[in-house]
Image: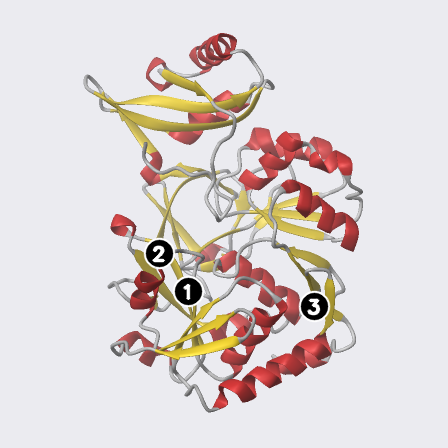
Amino acid sequence: MLKALKSNQDKIAIIDKGKEHSYQHLIDRINLYKSLIKDELSNGDIVALRAIYSFESIAMFIALYLNKNIVALLPDSPNLDEYLQSSNANKLIEIKSQINIKSLNPPKHDKIKELNNQSGLIIFSSGTLNKPKAIIHNLDNMVKNFADKRANSLRIILFLLFDHIGGINTLLSGLLSGSTLIIASDFSPKNICYLISKYKAHILPTTPSFLNLLLMTKEYENYDLSSLRLITYGTERMDENILIRLKNIFKKVKFIQTFGTSESGILPTTSKSSISTYFKLKPDEYKIKDGRLFLKSKTMFLGYMNLDSDNQWFDSGDLVKQDGDGFLKIIGRSKEIINVGGKKLLASEVESCILELDEIKDALVYALPCEILGQMVACDVVCDLAKSNAKELIKSHCKARLERYKVPVKINIVDEITFTNRFKKDRKLR
């Protein structure tokens, strides 16, 4: 990796809080941290890194990678002990005003043997009963995946989080291609538009929920975003109605759907068009069984630190359909199926129907308990209409396009649809 960084030593690598850091400055800081950790850490140590994206945290992350450590990236959560226990980390590094290294005493874990003295990465996702699943990857393999990345001088907003597989994908791809990464610490539409405008950013990797929030706030009208060439979106299903609205505003911007999971890593995709939610995966990296999408990739995880797993084919939980040209479309998640008296439907189908209405800015469809039918369809919607008018419009529109049991019974008019700290719609059971 250092060789790739050195080939771009005079270029700007990272912009953090308005300060520009060259690739040479990054190399110098990496070497400083390598010296710092040399006597504190042994090869193969599992090191929990508690930090958000910054110039310092990126330098430390690379230093740990070069030191052949397994880096557990801790989410921004008050449940620190729970994540530390799941990771089996024996060291904790916190980056604040100074670098703090703390020793821990975890049990050994057999999964580490599969790394064969290579560097590793541990990221987390929610598991059963909200206990975090510690997902272990071969970090050497992930870095190698970008070894042939073509050099460029693109400026990329580092939007997806440090502890997110998409954020790591952006980081590695950007640095190994000589791009400039612009760190966002405030993820409001106003600030993201400001960063794009000020630094003439070319690429924004983000989520459908953020993009719809951008549409609703209209902050794009207040800034010069003409430098923007590409918007990539992923982590959740994009509604085609929202995508068309976006393309009508950002006419010169190309939209590409990215796809992957914490377990599979980010897979190469080809979008059918900038206004289509259909995309292609490499034929050997997926299979469809009973409508569910299973994945296998070059960057497949080794397993879970705290759970048994079969990582040959990973069940993504996504329900898909495929067109005659081999393009896939995510139509929903298996856990978002609503059962109304034995008749099943996807929440996403009803959401898409509601979002066909120009008056509706956003919608979230979910199940509520029903004594007679087991579950009933409910939705939260954001709009400027009076409550009675909105409910009448939505019910009338859905009755004309959907089967009766799919029509929302309960409709709430809300100020906003809440989303998680990963900028996805919060779909926790009501």
User: Which residue lies under the disc numbered 1?
Assistant: 300
Q: Among all residues in the image, which is located at the extreme bottom? A: 39
Residue 164 lies, with reference to residue 46, above or below; the image says: above
- Disc 2 to disc 1: CB gap under 8 Å: yes
In three-dimensional space, the C-alpha distance between marks 2 and 1, rounded to whole angstroms, equals 9 Å
In the structure shown, which secondary structural element does the residue marked by tag 1 occupy? Answer: loop
In the structure shown, which secondary structural element does the residue marked by tag 2 occupy? Answer: strand
Residue 87 x, y percent position in the rendering: 33, 68
Residue 184 lies, with reference to residue 308, above or below; the image says: above
Q: Residue at x 50, y 38 (%)?
A: 323
- Disc 3 to disc 2: CB gap under 8 Å: no
Question: Looking at the picture, which amino acid does disc 2 mark?
Answer: Phe
In three-dimensional space, the C-alpha distance between marks 3 and 1, rounded to whole angstroms, equals 23 Å
Question: Looking at the picture, which amino acid does disc 1 mark?
Answer: Met
Question: Would you identify the image quadrant in which residue 255 lies?
Answer: top right
Q: Earlier in the sequence, mark 3 or mark 2?
A: 3
User: Which residue lies under the disc numbered 2?
Assistant: 314
Question: Would you identify the image quadrant in which residue 92 lies?
Answer: bottom left
Residue 132 visible? The answer is yes
Q: Residue at x 56, y 82 (%)?
A: 33
Q: Tell me: 120 left or right of 113.
A: right
Q: Residue at x 45, y 15 (%)?
A: 398
